[in-house]
Amino acid sequence: MKNSLTTALSAVLLLLAALPAMALDDRAASAQVNRWLQAHRQQIPLLRQFVQRLPKGADLHSHLTGAAYAETYLRLAAEHGLCVDSQTLAFVSPDGATCPSPSVSARQLPSGVYSAMVNQLSIRNVALSGSSGHDQFFATFSRFRLPANLPEASVALAAEVSNRAASQNILHLELMTTLQGSGVRELAGKLPWPQTPDFAASLAWLQANGLDAQVEAARNELDQFDQAYRATQRCGQPDAQPGCQISLRWQQQTSRTASPAQVFSQLAFAFALAHADGRVVGINLVAPEDDPVALRDYRLHMAMIGWLSRQMPDVNIALHAGELTQGLTPPETLRHHIADAVNVAGAKRIGHGVAIGYEDHATRTLATMHTRQVAVEVCLSSNDVILGVSGEQHPLPVYLAAGVPVVLASDDEGVSRIDLSHEYLRAAQTYRLSYPQLKQLSRNSLEYSFLPGDSLWRNLSAGKVLAVCRNDTPGAKALSPRCAHALGSSEKAQRQWQLEAAFRQFERDPLWAGR
């Protein structure tokens, strides 16, 4: 395995060496930063400072409720008068003005109970939980459901996540969430589901029985969120919180562990919502991929998504696929998930993709992902905790060597007790990535985001920007009229230009010269 990892990394380095210098790069400044990185690679505190300050583009794979830290849920519980069962360590609703025995007020938790709750809501001390990393990780979501569903909780969680992102020089977030979950589930419970699925008939039934009303309710929910979020964050005010500078978009998620009627209804709603509202930039499937129902219905789910995509081809698709490994499930289940997500469902991004080495046609799938530029969202920490896959067992070098676009993502940073900077640190340490490679991962995160508009890059891998901006300088006070027009008509290009300006500033820091 070690030889294969070395071979893959060598191929990546040769590939990068063959690329022309990017038009917007100052080669001397970039080389100086890279020399600093190589000289300080083993000094982890300094390396952490490096990746903390590194401009990082976007975090494209982040679950809102899993991104918030346990301490935030405990604070929300205290603010809203919830209780904590001191024996089961579960959140409990109060009985009037008092907490039912043996629960205690979340406002007055003994330090031992508070610490145990943090462990219960994260993988901070998974060794003491008596569960595997996989089971402890996924169990946290049901444990913080009560505070997560409190009024305005989503605003508090989004504020926390966006402010943390801004502190790490992240420009864009795509957060997975569930809008109108109970309403869509209620509608789905009435959907007649034939023994032989008929997607067209099922969609027609949903449309005739309230799907559009659910979409409109979700849009109103987003309107209310936007207003409350801006007020909470003081956006537009002199004391605005840093998260106001983050572009925030949503992916509507569907639980893959429900019945076929429920999954189809949730997917139909997700597609309709993303088609109707630009704030929802894509759809996704969530919940453990190794769940028995998820495994049983995997190909049916891919067929559902592929069919709905043909009805609404403007909707972006990102899918958790290949979040599996040998031993977690039978070998037969590892052979096709990523390929089906790409070829049947038409995913533009693959979340995790860890099981690629076990797939029947892995080489062909990698080639397809390279040709179609289907990005893989690599979540190193959660892959380690949930699957036990890390280091040379992880396929990150294989994806890089195959020319598949790679982005680093946090997944559930609150549950994992990490941030996106930690994932860059881990990648730099484990795979000895150079500064140009880390920079490429950052650029990829905006290039393969679902932000609207044309890319700044005419050809990112070849380093070619839009011709109209070729002679302009990121960060300059004035732009040529044609470049300004191009950036003004594309939110994606605006963010990419902002990232390039941040890189220019980062690379000119005297620290990298050793001064």
Image (cartoon, grey):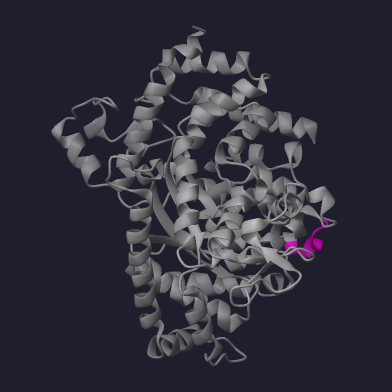
Q: Is residue 340 magenta?
A: no
Residue 328 inside the magenta-drawn segment: yes
Quadrant in which residue 208 is drawn: bottom left
Instruction: Reply above or below: 457 against 125.
Output: above
Q: Position of residue 145 (x, y in %)?
A: 61, 67
In this image, 126 relative to 213: left or right?
right
- Determine whether 351 is above or below 33 in the image: below
- Residue 24 in view: yes
- Residue 192 drawn at (x, y percent): 54, 93
Position of 384 relative to 131 (above/below): above
Residue at 55% over, 14% down: 36
Q: Residue at x 52, y 85 (%)?
A: 186
Compared to residue 165, the image places residue 206 above or below, namely below
Q: Position of residue 125 (x, y in %)?
A: 77, 47
Which residue is at 21% across, 26% downward?
Answer: 477
Left or right of 41: which side holds 218? left
Residue 338 lies left or right of residue 86; in this view the side is left
Residue range in magenta is 326-333
Percent x, y of residue 399: 61, 42
Residue 37, picture quadrant = top right
Looking at the rendered image, the quarter that the N terminus falls into is: top right
Which residue: 51% across, 53% down? 349
Q: Residue farthest to the left?
A: 481
Q: How many marks?
A: 0
Residue that protrudes farthest toward the top in the picture = 515
Closer to us: 199 or 143: 143
Using the rendered image of the protein, determine whether residue 317 is visible from the camera's viewpoint.
no
Q: Name the one closer to the observer, 254 or 334.
A: 254
Nearest the viewer among 270 and 511 is 511
Relative side of 223 to 206, left or right:
left
Q: Main secondary structure of the magenta part?
A: loop
Q: Quadrant of residue 246?
A: top left
